[in-house]
Image (spheres, grey):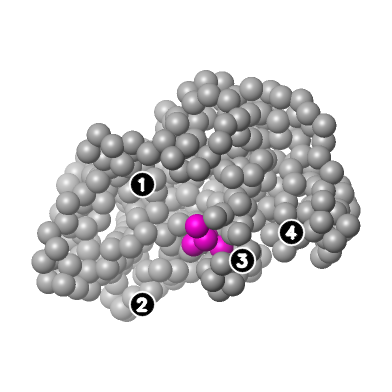
Amino acid sequence: MKSWQLVEPNKPLVLVETETPEPQGGEVLLRVKACGVCHSDLHFWQGGYDLGGGKWLTIEERGLALPLVMGHEPVGEVVALGPEAEGVAVGETRLVFPWIGCGACPRCAEGHDNDCTAMRTNGVFRPGGYADHIVVPDARYLIDVTGIDEHYAATLACAGITSYSALRKVHPLSADDKVVIIGAGGVGLTGVGIAAKYLAGHELIVLDLDDTKLAHARQAGATHTINPADEDAVDRIRELTGAGAGAIVDFVASGETARLGFESARKGGRYIAVGLYGGEITVPTVMLPGRNLTLRGSYVGRLEEMHELLGLVRGGGITPIPVQTRPMSQVTDTLEDLAAGRIVGRVVVVP
């Protein structure tokens, strides 16, 4: 088995050859056909997260151990089953839902694996999809994507589910509400395509510093686009909305974009932080009750939401994001391009 492993932060991933694992118990072994390259992988590759104020959370402090096979957006073909595995058959192509909880805590029992404090995420706490094979602990986390392009499908269990779960949190909206989306990268652009269908009837205002990404956002269904480098974003949002946006979904979530979102929300509005760019904000506490604001985070999504999203995709109307395909041997180059902002949409790497 070949895998491209993170051995040291900010260094090229290392090609390692090992014996192909044999699935045990209820595990399933898949031959990887494609794996998306996610902005979250940049944080692992760069060694941690910016907490603002000069503070830094290392990947070790988060619980990651090196070497690590990253890649939490794989699609693969089932090639072997553990003796207790059921629900899939050899030869079937499946999308891996990576956000796997411990299976024993109250959150997992509720179906909220993404709120489990002992997650077993493929590509984070278990070997992921930057490899030619991957082991998944249970077939319930393998999603049928028949009829959906495999390369596009690879983006749905992260960019797709993350944006969909965040957009579900904007409700309830009033009839006159407009929704702001900050960031038109891979996840944000996916969100625009989903919101244009899921939030039909509400105008979408999309912000990004890259005019090319804004052009793609308009193609995906954005009603208005704003480049904060060219105009005052808060003033423009207020001009378009009157009293402010009913909801702001921030797929960047830097200190600067969080302040922008806080200032742009109407009274009774919602600001939802999704991105992991890093930084910090200071919020006058009196303004939270005074403006009746909701500030919250949204982390990936639930297995139930994954199935809901696939229903929306199969139903049509959601504009797929641009997807490039590269050899997996170019995964380090792809991470560098992603860090530099040179990628529109998503790149999937293929063994």
Magenta residues, as a range?
113-117
User: Which one is earlier in the sequence, the residue at label 1 or at label 2?
Assistant: 2
Q: CA distance from mark 2 to mark 4?
A: 35 Å
The amino acid type found where label 4 is placed reads: Asp
Could you say which quadrant of the image residue 240 lies in? bottom left
Q: Which is in the foreground here, disc 1 or disc 3? A: 3
Q: Which residue is at a point 44% across and 40% down the rendered structure image?
A: 61
Reading the image, the residue beneath label 3 is 104
User: Which one is earlier in the sequence, the residue at label 1 or at label 4?
Assistant: 4
Q: Which residue is at a point 19% across and 73% down the rendered structure image?
A: 292
Whole-percent x, y for residue 43 in the image: 45, 36
Q: Is residue 308 magenta?
A: no
Q: Secondary structure at mark 1?
A: loop
Reading the image, the residue beneath label 1 is 252
Q: Secondary structure at mark 4?
A: loop
Could you say which quadrant of the image residue 283 lies in? bottom left
Label tally: 4
Q: CA distance from mark 4 to mark 3?
A: 14 Å
Image mark for residue 138 = 4
Reading the image, the residue beneath label 2 is 172
- Residue 178 visible to the viewer: yes
Q: CA distance from mark 1 to mark 2?
A: 23 Å
Q: Secondary structure at mark 3?
A: loop
Q: Which residue is at a point 63% across and 35% down the rendered structure image?
A: 69
Specify the quadrant that holds the N terminus: top right
Specify the quadrant that holds the C terminus: top right
The amino acid type found where label 1 is placed reads: Val
